[in-house]
Amino acid sequence: MSILIDEKSRVLVQGITGRDGSFHTQGMLEYGTKVVAGTTPGKGGEKVHGVPVFNTVAEAREAVGVNASVVYVPFAYAADAVLEAADAGIELVVCITEGVPVLDAVRLMRMLEGSGTRLVGPNCPGVISPGKAKLGIMPGPIHTRGPVGVVSRSGTLTYEVVYNLTRAGLGQSTCIGIGGDPVIGTRFIDVLELFEDDDETEAIVLIGEIGGTDEEEAAEFIAHHVTKPVVGFIAGRTAPPGKRMGHAGAIVSGGSGTAADKVKALERHGVGVASTPAEIATLVAGVVGKAG
Amino acid sequence: MNLHEYQAKDLFRKAGIPVPGGEVAATPAEARAIAAKVGRPVMVKAQVHSGGRGKAGGIQRAATPEEAEAHASNILGMKIKNLPVRRVLVTAAEEIGREYYAGLVLDRRVGRVTLMVSPAGGIDIEEVARETPEKIFKFPIDPIVGLPAYQARAVAFRLDANAPVALQIAPILQKLGTLYHDSDASLAEINPLVVTPDGRVLALDAKVVLDDNGLYRHPELEALRDPEAEAPAEVLAREAGLSFVKLEGDVGCVVNGAGLAMATMDMIQHHGGKPANFLDIGGSSNPTKVTAALRIITGDPNVKGILFNIFGGITRCDDVAAGLLESFRELEIRVPVVVRLTGTNEEKAREMLRGQQGVTPAATMDEAVRAILAHVEGRGVR
């Protein structure tokens, strides 16, 4: 097993004719992902890397059958694209787009309430179940199939961690970038719950960063609902307060959201927190196979 | 993006939120003229992106235009939390009867914009949250419904039981909500919201922070950006499309991705060093971004060494290497550079950099950090 996506996922790419959409469609196809349709309004009937393009998501779904979507449309239209996918009944929508206004995300999350659609992102690298499917922009070859579930607010930092895990012989069940924005669709606790229920996942790596209190909530959740070992890492120990560190959500404001608070919360609930990305693999190696 | 008080008050005025009359001045003479026009005692207020202006002496009362000129000449040019004051707001002084707090802010935990009010106005709301959290009331706003009139009234009556006053506060709260929404704000705050002895309600101070991601649909607000309020290097970085934050250390960092950039800074500190900056060159590979990054970093006299940490995915290592070589031709790079490149086209990149003087390759992030710290003078490696 893996979570969210596997070799059976039938994937739609929204914004498939754009520069990013087209480039990453190729990457996803090369990885073996079943990309079965794309959309770009006004470009219906075209093909991108052999994938048929439709004008609307509903049309694509009707024609070829789709259960997951990846959104590469520009930030001004991303929220609308996610809504379109939800309205067409797509179960999983992964929004890669960076730069979505926060108020768009707030409205979007309100409208997805009770819709049956799960949103991952925005501003994320996507989801990969190694050897099965990749919905996103991460480099495929650094991943390998195995027992470690990875969830992260970051992109390249996740690649760094996955690279170290793979080199240490620790494969991954699924790796999920939940995104660096202040308001996101799927949060740490949602993914922790999925990993807890996944047979293939034996240990979980949680990569957080400064800003907000999702890591603290995750720590609380782990204490009560997660039996599998969790290894944590928090980026931004040296970040000055009041400064946005690249990600829209990575900011310490009013003394809240510091790395120190997050590390403390995780450690208090028994999560081993690595002090460098390389140390994560060492800590995981110490717990894999010992899961209760 | 932060707005100055005078800019925020302009938005308030346009939204119909009552503020005391006044204008902004860049010279003492202008301050004097504005005070004369106001025709009564004024407050002369430093316009900087910082709290604690009053404590720093950046807010003074003036009874006459001459006094306003004298205060302005004092305040203009002073530094508040290291930020030079280049403008003052000269505004009618109001008598304060009671003072409250009202603000709208994103509550990340619930993913909603939240109206916060407090009877403890006029002091830092974060201090109130710490010392007397029971004096803060929060009301999450449904993004589809907005702030309905009845809810605004209920909140207003909780602040002030005097009906004529509460019925002035309620529409102010609604207008603040509209302003927040229409300007893509991430914070809109009135502190204090005052009731004058004669029963008028006024926003005596105004703070508005805008969501950078929303600015594209508000060119008129983008135009309010004050480049003088930002570190010059941060302005250059923004113009080059780089995400950059200046820090106090001596190890310059060039990294792709915000999370990895933070982790790199953290690792430098972990090994006993101090990062000079946060810098994310972004996801796309663009050699000119690398050159822009190095121009900014080498412009910092504190920098004694530069660390490249690139994990290539979409970013191609050979593009980064090309940018680095180009920088060596264009710029005077006098400090050692350690380069760690992993991922897409790393072999090609390594080949390109072979033989470039001043560049040391490293295989891993850990090795790279140790290597740059060994280069940076007088720094022990733990």
Image (cartoon, coloured by chain):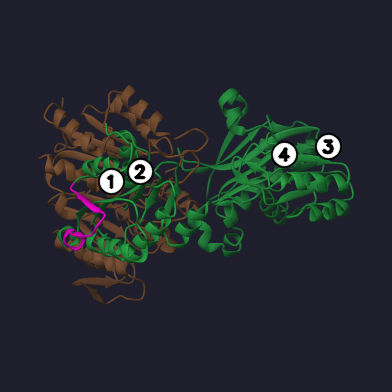
Chain colours: A brown, B green
Badge 4 density bin: few <14, some 14–19, many ≥20, Cα 10 Å: many
Q: Which residue is mark 3?
A: B95
Distance between mark 3 and mark 4 Cα atoms:
12 Å
Q: Which residue is mark 2?
A: B262
Q: Where residue A34 appears, x then y in whole percent? A: 17, 60
Distance between mark 4 and mark 2 Cα atoms:
39 Å
Residue A157 bears which disc, if any?
1
Q: Where residue B367 appears, x then y in whole percent? A: 21, 42
Badge 1 density bin: few <14, some 14–19, many ≥20, Cα 10 Å: many
**Label 4's element?**
strand
Q: Where residue B122 appears, x then y in whole percent? A: 70, 33
Determine the residue positioned at 77% across, 32% down: B98
Residue A248 bears which disc, if any?
none
**Circle nearer the N terminus (2, 3):** 3
Q: Amino acid at mark 1?
A: Leu
Asked where in the image residue B228 lies, by quadrant, the reply is bottom right
Q: Amino acid at mark 2?
A: Met
Badge 3 density bin: few <14, some 14–19, many ≥20, Cα 10 Å: few
Circles 3 and 1 in contact, beta carbons < 8 Å: no
Label 1 resides on the chain identified as A
Magenta segment boundaries in residue numbering: B350-363
Same subunit: marks 3 and 4: yes
**Label 1's element?**
helix
Q: Is residue B18 left or right of residue B182?
A: right
